[in-house]
Amino acid sequence: MEDVLDVYTRPYDPNHPQVCFDESSKQLVAEKIEPLPAEPGKEQRYDYQYECNGVCKLFMFFEPLAGWRYVEVTNQHTAIDYAHQMKYLVDDIYPNANKITVVHDQLNTHVPSSLYKAFEPAEAKRILDKLEFHYTPKHGSCLNMAEIELSVFTHQCIDRRIRDQQTLKQEITAWEEERNNLGNCVDWQFPTADARIKLKRLYPSIQN
């Protein structure tokens, strides 16, 4: 835990960006009956009947010091998908960075070996040499700022019925552009000293 909190105290460095990474999902739902439009004094009304159109997986990249975020939509979130997200981070988002710090949770796919499942050894090592991983503690994923940004994203963008993946991607793009243009950053106010008191349960117990 303190390792992650120490990362958050580092100053902004474009050559060594700090990126928080998290995953979520979104069920796609189509209307069987057209919603009734909003009227004065009445919100838009939806029928209780709907049609399930599958589930999309969402990968969130969030650079809190730069006020930048990006959400990728996929059909699944396997070790191979994770590996390709890390390659995208290195080659497309930060191709000129010397090193990229990645903060994420301890999901079983969030490991270097996932890249060796997806790529040839030389390619996997090339990508991993650009990455520096830091893991939130078990039951302490709230320390991942990407999880906080995912909560904002859910509330502002997808907390409603969305019928298909194309519509979902359009909504995400519009949300990203608006929020990135505003440059919404995070002023992290939870230092290690506070964590030792408030999150004492996350520390290993020492028995005499």
Image (cartoon, grey):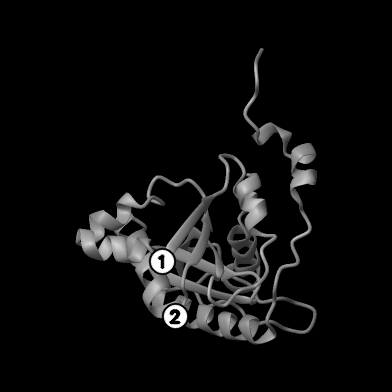
In terms of secondary structure, where does tag 2 sit? loop
Dot 1 or dot 2: first in sequence order is: 2
Which numbered tag is attached to residue 96? 2
Q: Where is mark 1, residue-wise?
A: 130
Q: Residues within 10 Å of mark 1 (few under 14, many from 20)?
A: many
Q: Is residue 4 left or right of residue 191?
A: left
Amino acid under disc 1? Lys
Mark 2 and mark 1 in contact (Cβ < 8 Å)? Answer: no
Q: Is residue 180 left or right of residue 108?
A: right
In terms of secondary structure, where does tag 1 sit? loop
Q: Position of residue 23 (x, y in %)?
A: 48, 58
Amino acid under disc 2? Asn
Q: Position of residue 55 (x, y in %)?
A: 40, 61
Q: Nearer the viewer, residue 50 or 74?
A: 74
Which numbered tag is attached to residue 208? none
Q: Position of residue 10 (x, y in %)?
A: 66, 63
